[in-house]
């Protein structure tokens, strides 16, 4: 699932894993796989906008 989301948003899968590790994303967990709900994807879109378009770094994103 993470590879599909990464491809959809043109991110490296490790970027998504980093966002999870630092607590920016908390995707739903169903059994042993990740799940992405609409709120998860909406939050990711905000994070991407802040990072790509506005130049907010990881420290700034963590305060979000």
Image (spheres, rainbow, N blue to C red):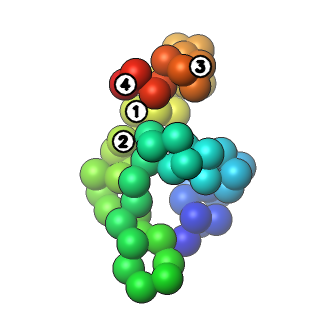
Element marked by disc 2: helix
Expressed as whole percent of the image width and height from the top left, the position of residue 15 reads 65, 45
Expressed as whole percent of the image width and height from the top left, the position of residue 19 reads 54, 43
Give the label, 1 or 4, closer to the camera.
4
Q: Nearer the viewer, residue 37 or 58?
A: 58
Give the label, 4 or 2, closer to the camera.
4
Name which residue lies at 47% across and 25% down.
Answer: 61
Residue 24 position by quadrant: top left
Q: Are marks 1 and 4 in contact (CB under 8 Å)?
A: yes
Q: CA distance from mark 1 to mark 4?
A: 10 Å
Q: Nearer the viewer, residue 7 or 19?
A: 19
Expressed as whole percent of the image width and height from the top left, the position of residue 38 reads 30, 57
Where, quadrant-wise, is the N terminus in this rendering? bottom right
According to the image, label 2 marks what residue? Answer: 43
Position of 16 with respect to 62 (left or right) is right
Q: Which mark is residue 64?
A: 4
Name which residue lies at 55% across and 48% down.
Answer: 21
Element marked by disc 1: helix
Q: CA distance from mark 4 to mark 2?
A: 10 Å
Which is more N-terminal, label 2 or label 3? Answer: 2
Name which residue lies at 51% across and 50% down.
Answer: 20
Q: Which mark is residue 57?
A: 3
Q: Which mark is residue 13?
A: none
Expressed as whole percent of the image width and height from the top left, the position of residue 63 reads 40, 22
Q: CA distance from mark 2 to mark 1?
A: 5 Å
Q: Nearer the viewer, residue 14 or 9?
A: 14
Position of 33 with respect to 30 (left or right) is right
According to the image, label 1 marks what residue? Answer: 46
Give the label, 3 or 2, closer to the camera.
3
Which is more N-terminal, label 4 or label 1? Answer: 1
Element marked by disc 3: loop
């Amino acid at each position: 699932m993470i590879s599909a989301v990464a491809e959809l948003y043109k991110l490296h899968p490790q970027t998504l894993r980093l966002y999870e590790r630092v607590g920016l994303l908390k995707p739903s967990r169903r059994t042993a796989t990740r799940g992405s709900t609409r709120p998860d994807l909406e939050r990711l879109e905000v994070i991407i906008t802040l990072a790509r378009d506005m130049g907010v770094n990881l420290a700034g994103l963590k305060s979000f």
